[in-house]
Amino acid sequence: MIKQIDPGHQNSIIKVLGIKIQTMLDEGHLNSVEVELIEDVARLAEILELYPGLPETVIKKILFAMSYFIDENDEIPDIIPDYGYLDDVKVVSWVIDDIRNQIPKMTRA
């Protein structure tokens, strides 16, 4: 599935991602899993912004994680209270762990 991700859709994926996150925040009542998930997905978006020259495989993995999070009808539908985002957490965590060594180290000023 990752191979099918088109990096040319990065801007549209990020746009929908922003809408999804804002909707979750507007609805309120976020549990700790959902808060951590939002932080992790935002971190992935930041990585794309800070490092536009990443290898295509890394970009595709990041966009896959974002697309999975955006999809409300993934393996565990997001509408299921307390459980709907558990699969999203695993996918996002897997991508973060997988790309960790492929992201340039940030230097402190």
Image: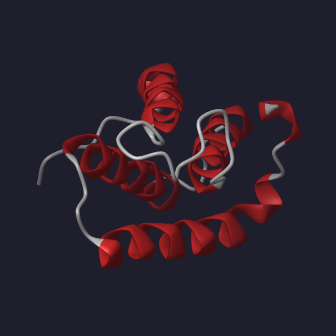
Screen quadrant of the C terminus? bottom left
Which residue is painted at 52% across and 31% down in the image? 87
Which residue is painted at 54% across and 30% down in the image? 91
Comparing 103 with 35, the one in front is 35
Residue at the far left in the pictured view: 109
9 horizontally vs 44: left or right: right
28 horizontally vs 84: left or right: left
Residue 102 x %, y %: 50, 27
Residue 14 x %, y %: 59, 67
- Count all numbered tags in the image, as a single digit: 0
12 horizontally vs 47: left or right: right
Which residue is painted at 61% across and 71% down in the image? 16
**As drawn, 62 above or below 102:** below
**As drawn, 37 above or below 101:** below
Residue 5 x %, y %: 81, 45
Image quadrant in which you'd find residue 42: bottom left
